Image (cartoon, rainbow, N blue to C red):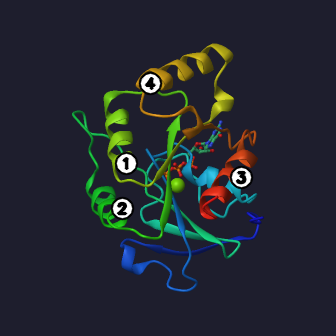
Amino acid sequence: MINFSNANFVKSASLKDERPKEPCLPEVLIVGRSNVGKSSLINALCNKKNMAFTSSKPGHTKLLNYFNIDNTFYLVDAPGYGYAKTGIDLDRVFGDMMNDYLENNDRLKAILFLLDSRRELNEDDLELIEYLQDKGYIFLLITTKMDKLNQKDTAALNKRLAESGLLAPEQIVRTSSLNKTNINSLCKLIEKIVFDK
Ligand SMILES: Nc1nc2c(ncn2[C@@H]2O[C@H](COP(=O)(O)OP(=O)(O)OP(=O)(O)O)[C@@H](O)[C@H]2O)c(=O)[nH]1
Ligand SMILES: [Mg+2]
């Protein structure tokens, strides 16, 4: 069993080469739009209040932040991105860093793509999901801030996700870091992935 509470911040890096050398561990990447709740999810998974810095101002995380989880794997907090008006703006910082990180990364076990559950899934989101899935890593869609949704909203979100046809039901995990909804199931899922089970 991975003890997610045994976690600590190791370092920030902007290139794959700069990641922690020792110990050499598998990595799980957390990616999503600015302010979607990436850092909050990391804190929730690890049962910490402020290990990953959260902020109500978007764009707080500028580098890839590596967290060592129980000497078993690294959770990697990616910088948030925004979209340009037309198409995906894998904006410069995010784009260069992500390209470097996502290409031929033999340590990367899975991408957790976070989506704010209140957002309409637009073409840009779908394009980005497809782009990330095409990289060939295990891909999970994590909806965040589910505490903000009523039953009707939740049904609408489920419908949108099903209609997108991009994801199998078992690839979707609906979470709230605030209420700890599905945080334990996500830990179990990550554990399976890290141990190749
Ligand atoms: N209600 C609610 N608010 C949340 C939840 N998760 C995060 N938030 C809030 O959303 C805001 C952004 O959270 P962060 O965790 O800093 O988001 P981030 O994706 O790391 O943001 P960047 O690093 O700037 O890209 C903060 O004000 C959090 O308190 C949640 O599950 N429920
Ligand atoms: Mg952050």
Which residue appears farthest toward the bottom when viewing the image?
22
Q: Which residue is mark 1?
A: 132
Q: Secondary structure at mark 1?
A: helix
As rendered, which of 55 and 192 lies closer to the eye?
192
Real-space Cα separation, disc 3 to disc 2, in angstroms:
24 Å
Q: Quadrant of the C terminus?
A: bottom right
Q: Which residue is mark 2?
A: 102
Q: Does residue 178 lie above or below 93 as drawn?
A: above
Mark carried by residue 188: 3
Work out whether residue 44 can be spotted: no
Q: Position of residue 110 (x, y in %)?
A: 50, 56
The three-letter code of the residue at mark 1 reads: Leu
Q: Quadrant of the N terminus?
A: bottom right
Q: Which residue is mark 4?
A: 120
Seen at 51% across and 34% down, the residue is 168
Q: Residues within 10 Å of mark 1 (few under 14, many from 20)?
A: some
Real-space Cα separation, disc 4 to disc 1, in angstroms:
19 Å
